Amino acid sequence: MKRYWSRLLALVLVAVIGLIGCSGSPDGLSGDYRQDTLSVINTLRHALELPDNSPEKGAAQAQARQKINTFAARYQRDSSVTGLASFTTMRTALNSLAGHYSSYPNRPVPKKMKERLEMEFEQVEAALKRGA
């Protein structure tokens, strides 16, 4: 009987540890392409809208860079989304903003680039509503 309980306890512990390990996504993305895309857009908009002299600007830019990297890593090889218009437009926006952050980390994003990014974000949102 003692052997039965020890095996049952071991099985329960393995199941609990396995379920806890699978409970959340460590990169902060849910795995739902539409929801993740909108989340990244909101994060990027927040980082772009902050005034240049804001004390939280650096943290917002760091979070934006991290979201860009995790989004790209998760979806760039996912064949179910790579052909979507929303994905290609989103990648264009992400590449341009990531390039600016890498090349000019201490300079503010130019107004012209902000306007273009906002236009691309609107195109992505419209495409997501259409399901493309």
Image (tube, grey):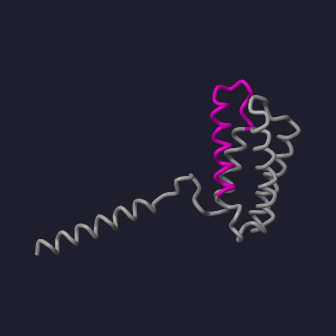
From what the image shows, is residue 68 above or below residue 108? below
What residue lies at 80% left-to-right and 50% top-to-bottom? Answer: 93
Magenta range: 48-73
User: In this image, 69 relative to 113: left or right?
Assistant: left
Q: Position of residue 72 (x, y in %)?
A: 69, 55
Does the segment drawn in magenta span residue 57? yes
Q: Position of residue 95 (x, y in %)?
A: 78, 49
Q: Position of residue 37 (x, y in %)?
A: 69, 56
The rendered magenta stretch, by its main secondary structure, is classed as helix
Q: Position of residue 91 (x, y in %)?
A: 77, 55
Picture quadrant where residue 90 is located: bottom right
From what the image shows, is residue 4 above or below residue 114? below
For the residue pair 14 and 67, the one nearer the viewer reads as 14
What residue lies at 64% left-to-right and 59% top-to-bottom? Answer: 74
For the residue pair 23 and 14, the one nearer the viewer reads as 14
Does the segment drawn in magenta span residue 126? no
Count of numbered labels shown in the rendering: 0
User: In this image, 103 relative to 32: left or right?
Assistant: right
